[in-house]
Image (cartoon, helix red, strand yellow):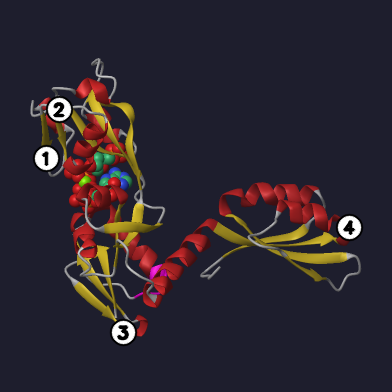
Amino acid sequence: MLRIAVPNKGSLSGPAAEMLHEAGYRQRKEAKELVLVDPDNQVEFFFLRPRDIAVYVGSGRLDVGITGRDLLLDSASEAEEVLALGFAGSTFRFARPVGTGIAGVRDLEGLRIATSYTGLVEQHLAEHGVKAAAVTKLDGAVETAVHLGVADVIADVVETGTSLRNAGLEVFGDPILVSDAVVIRPKGAGEDPAVEQFLRRLQGVLVARRYVLMDYDIRAEQVGAAVALTPGLESPTVSPLHTEGWVAVRSMVLRKEAQRIMDDLWAIGARAILVTNIHACRI
Ligand SMILES: Nc1ncnc2c1ncn2[C@@H]1O[C@H](COP(=O)(O)OP(=O)(O)OP(=O)(O)O)[C@@H](O)[C@H]1O
Ligand SMILES: O=P(O)(O)OC[C@H]1O[C@H](OP(=O)(O)OP(=O)(O)O)[C@H](O)[C@@H]1O
Ligand SMILES: [Mg+2]
């Protein structure tokens, strides 16, 4: 049975559960369940703290896991990213009190930094040859550390920037990392058909979320122009219509471009343009 680590709490847990459900896996009924067996799919889910998942997978005790790229890299575990999942997107950045002159990583020499991600910060400082006075590890609400005098600057997860603004802080320097929810495996793990199948299912969900199916009718002489607008992933399906001189086209298009493409198709004479959701797929 494939053993999969899944986040039990925080920003990653809800979207991860939703994605696994869309991929056809059983989900736990209540948040206190720690292990769930899905015999129909031959998998076993272990609900763990997101920060610990890289440790379990890196040690090879679990075959595969879902966590954040920032947590994976902070842990320095023997696990590696194999697929980005497109949720829990954020950047990991330094922030200073508004208006202070600290402009980049080099200005951090001799300063005190608070963060929940000491591994990431120490690695980043080392890469730039900078020696901070202290890198203090806090569990959360890191933005408050400056106000309370525990640190001069912080390094934290930033999504909308609201938490920083509320604390009178602002980002400076380049992002240390762009993060996303990711699937991880032990480094160097060999081919495993069960893992491949798991990844194919998740890739199917990603494609079903990104793309829609577009159907339309068009005069045969315009089919070249129409197909240029809807080239599909490989090649669109073109079928004859009962009405002489017309064809039906079916193609996958990016969901976010669907309305613009419908306008463009209409302008070259396409009619009966229909868009449908893809429920599941294997590409
Ligand atoms: N506001 C946010 N927006 C997007 N991703 C976030 C946000 N906060 C945390 N993350 C991501 O979630 C992961 C951290 O999960 P974790 O459960 O440790 O913290 P959390 O989501 O902040 O939950 P909590 O602080 O309630 O325990 C990281 O990959 C981080 O990048
Ligand atoms: O840029 P924003 O949209 O404000 O999001 C970023 C904030 O969200 C997370 O905090 P969370 O609410 O999980 O609290 P925590 O700091 O205690 O983990 C993260 O640690 C930042 O503080
Ligand atoms: Mg948090």
Q: Is residue 210 magenta?
A: no
Determine whether the residue tagged by mark 4 lies in a helix, strand or loop: helix
Q: Choose the circle earlier in sequence order: 3 or 2.
A: 3
3D distance between C-alphas at marks 1 and 2: 13 Å
Query: If the image is split into quadrants, where does the N terminus sit?
Result: bottom left
Q: In which image quadrant can residue 15 be found?
A: bottom left
Q: Which residue is mark 4?
A: 221
Which residue is under mark 3?
39
Amino acid under label 3? Pro
Q: Quadrant of ligand 2?
A: top left
Mark found first going from the N terminus, 4 or 3: 3
| Residue 65 percent coordinates (x, y) | 29, 64
Residue at 75% x, 56% y is 227
Residue wearing tag 2: 132
What is the CA distance from the residue labelled 3 to the residue labelled 1?
A: 41 Å
For the point 20% across and 54% down, the residue is 51
Q: In whole angstroms, how far apart are the C-alphas of marks 4 and 1?
A: 67 Å
Q: Secondary structure at mark 1?
A: strand
The residue identified by callout 1 is 137
Q: In this image, 261 relative to 4: left or right? A: right
Residue 24 lies within the magenta run: yes
Magenta: predominant secondary structure element?
A: loop
Q: Which residues are magenta?
A: 21-25
Residue at the image point whose x is 23% and y is 61% from the top: 58
* Front: mark 3 or 1: 1
The residue closer to the viewer here, 252 or 186, is 186
In-image side of 260 versus 112 (left or right): right
Does residue 24 appear in the picture of this structure?
yes
Mark 1 or mark 2, whichever is nearer to me? 2
Q: Amino acid at mark 4?
A: Glu
